Structures are given as structure tokens and as C-alpha cells.
Image (cartoon, helix red, strand yellow):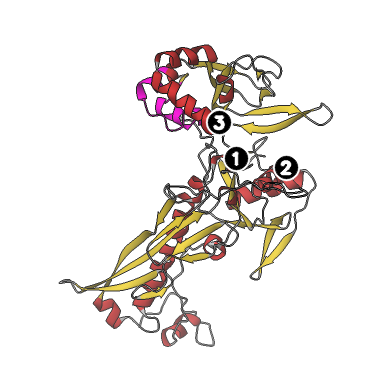
Amino acid sequence: MSISKTHDENSLSLGTAAARQLATTTKSEPQMQGISSRWLLKLLPWVQVSGGTYRVNRRMSYAVGDGRVTFTSTGAKVVVIPQELGELPLLRGYEDVEVLTALASRFVQKEYKAGDILTEAGKEADSIVLIAHGKVNRIGAGKYGEPTVLETLADGDHYSYQALLESQDFWQFTVKAVTPVTALILQQSAFEAVVAQAPSLHKHIETFKALAKKKQDTSGQAAIELASGHHGEPVLPGTYVDYETAPREFELSVAQTVLQIHTRVADLFNDPMNQTQQQLRLTVEALKERKEHELINNREFGLLHNADLKQRIHTRRGPPTPDDMDELLATVWKEPSFFLAHPRAIAAFGQECNRQGIYPTSIDMNGNMIPAWRGIPIVSCNKIPVTESRTSSIMLMRVGEKNQGVVGLHQAGIPDEIEPSLNVRFMGINEKAIMSYLVTAYFSAAVLTPDALGILESVEIGRS
């Protein structure tokens, strides 16, 4: 008789290896490492979209957004893509490619070292500057004449198109390079030469000037005429609230997959756990992970791509500092709900706080202790990308339809629904005895007003 290698001849009792042959092991449900906390899905208020499309109606806005410009490079030479000049407020909506190409060819590339001055306050403002690469500070005078940083500009930003509209005006600020900078500069004389040869561009500029003269509020919306503080019986102003004539509409997006299970597995191997249920459970978890990823990264409705460009700011030095987080709070100052950041970005912020001897508090959210800044929770989301250069973004948002914030969109009550706007439909059994289930989630997101979402960009992580 052979003796098992695991059997001890000197043992006085039954070993565990042999005992296991007569025992039923206790099993866990199938585990899945990719399941995350999915805070965005939990914290977003979800709006029922019964018709499958959600329209965001806003007041008429005359302000033309400051877009970001894209460049191409060949070796060390950088050029602006002609069509991208349409991102400049002055040229927004202008589509004559031949004229835009003529303008693009007149930009001159210049290189600056960290600390160099690009433009100096008090000197003649006679050009527009595009920041192709690097970071600069726009510096103005403080209350008592001391220099103060007004704004940080980086890749794709620009200043100042107003210089091309007026003659003999002067820079009201100084621009200083924080890092090595590559800039493209268009002189006013070169711009006017192109305008003189292009009647369509001249007409476009005159229309732009007329639009800029219309009464606007501080947000660039058509002003509502009001009177206050008057006495007697003056004639009160007449007014009306104008709306956008072509409001944006959001159709519900879809994420789907077909789950396949062999009938033999479903029939014979369902004890102690139902194989079909476990397969569906993990498939639904994966679908929810994709749902959150799309809400962040989708180019049509994802939050990273739908934040207003005026609501995007850059870090002053690289890593996220308390000053940067305060600056982000200033962009979403009306009832901010929460920050959303990659776990590594949260760690980088904690490291900067440690360096400054600042210790942020934590708050309780659904039984979880979450780090917070100024009382606003900083929740993690591993769907926010980290680039190869180890930079990421931090978002701050106000949520809710009543608050004119960010909302999630779905349609509850669809056929074969297992969760709101998520269903599982049996598709039949094929000739190979394989059952198929169609698993579908419908969703989208909308930013109701531009000031509901702010993004701190170019956040460096992992700096020692």
C-alpha cells in the first residue's frame, strides 16, 4: 500500500489534508479587481429623460468663449493649424480656410527661457500671442502697486486678441515665462495686411465689434434691464429675457455587451452558487465601470471635455497646492458639491499640504472618511487619466438640476430593467447550446451652466 507524501507516519490524529476530502469548502463569490468605488455614479443626481434626449435651455449669451488653439510641429518648428484660429474669440465662426491659412503663415515662432518677459506692462500692445508650449504668468499690479499673478496660461492658451482691434493701446499687464516657452506671435501690421485683402474677414470683424457692444452681464449673457434706488415716478426700463435659439441637446449614450453562458454550465454547476447570476453580476459591474469612464472621458458628453474653457485653470508650479485648490474653488464658488481626482492626484495634494504644514480635515460620507478641503470632500476616481508625463486633472463641480449644476441623465423603467436605465434581455440559445444575454446601460451627463464645473489642469503627480 502506498503512503501519501503528505502523511506523517508519527501523527496521532487525522491530518487536515485528508479531512478536507470529506468536508465541503466555504467559497467566496467570484472577485473582480477592477471594481472601484465609483463615487461619481453615487454622487451625481440622475434626471429622468423619458424622451431619450435632454435639452439644456440657457439665456442668450453674447460672450464668445476663449478657445484653445492646437499646433503641429516638425522638429523644432511649430505652426498653428489654420482652422484652429477659429478658436480665438475674434475669429470664432469664420470659416474661410484660405484666409485663415494666410493668417497662420504670418505667426512668428519665438523661444523664451524661464524668467524671460514676453510682454511688458506699459509698452505698446501690437500683437497677439499664442502659447504653443510651456507655462507663463500674467502679472498685474496689486492694491499697493506690488506685482501679483493674475492668471497662469499654458499650452494652447493665448492673449490678447483685443490688441488687434485697436491702435496705440498699451499692455495692462506683464507676461513672464515660468518654464521654457515656445510662443507664436502675430503682429498687428501683419493682421491688418490680411484684413485689407479679405473683405469677408473685414465684415466678420465688424460684426464681432457690434456684438461686443451689446449690453451684457458679467457672465456675457444678454442683460436684463432693471431699475433700483429711484424716487418718484421715473419711467421704468422695459426688458425681456432672451434665450439661445439653438440650445444643446444630449441623447442618451449606450454601453452594451453580450454575455454568453453554456447551458451545461448553467444546468449542472449551480450549487452552491448560481453560475448565471454570478456571470451577470460581474458583467454588470464591468458595465458600470465603463459607464463612469464614459461620463469622464467621452468626447461628446464627458466632463473633462465639456468644461467651459474659462473654467479651466493651471497649477502655478506643477503639483496641486492649497493655493491651486483655492483658485479652483473660486471658479465654482456657488455651492460646490465635491472635488473629483485620481487617487495619485489626491496623494500629490496631500504631499504639498505636508510640505506646508497644513493638515486637511476629513468628513464622513456614507460611513467613509473622505479627505476634504475647505469642507468640500475630495473623492477619488481612477477613470481620470494620468498622462505619460505624469500629469492629471482635478475637477470641482456643483451638482443638481435645481442648483443649475452637473446632472446625470438616464431613463428608468425600460423593459427587463434590473437597475434604473440598465437591463438584461435574454437573446436565446444557439445551435451550440450557448445562451446569450444582452446587457445594456443608457446614460449621459449635462453641465447646465458653465460655472457648474471647473478643472485644475496639468496637475503633476509623483514629484519628490
Q: Is residue 163 above or below residue 11?
A: above
Q: Nearer the viewer, residue 452 or 198?
A: 198
Q: Callout 3: helix, strand or loop?
A: loop
The image's mark for residue 92 is: none
Residue linked to disc 1 = 216
Residue 286 on image: x %, y %: 42, 63
Residue 433 lies left or right of residue 228; in this view the side is: left
The CA span between labels 1 and 2 is 31 Å
Q: Which residue lies at the image location 53% right of the left edge and 88% below the top edge?
A: 13
Name the kind of residue labelled 3 in the image: Asp
Dot 3 or dot 2: first in sequence order is 3
Q: Given the current orientation, which residue lies at the most extreme front position?
A: 233
Q: Which residue lies at the image location 36% right of the left edge and 25% below the top edge?
A: 96
Dot 1 or dot 3: first in sequence order is 3
Q: Callout 1: helix, strand or loop?
A: loop
Circle 1 or circle 2, nearest the eye = 1
The CA span between labels 3 and 2 is 21 Å
The CA span between labels 1 and 3 is 24 Å
Residue linked to disc 3 = 157
Q: Is residue 95 magenta?
A: yes
Q: Residues within 10 Å of mark 3 (few under 14, many from 20)?
A: many
Q: Which residues are magenta?
A: 79-102
Q: Nearer the viewer, residue 283 or 215?
A: 215
Question: The C terminus appears in which quarter of the rendering?
Answer: top right
Residue linked to disc 2 = 323
Q: Residues within 10 Å of mark 2 (few under 14, many from 20)?
A: few
Residue 4 on image: x %, y %: 41, 78
Q: Is residue 410 magenta?
A: no
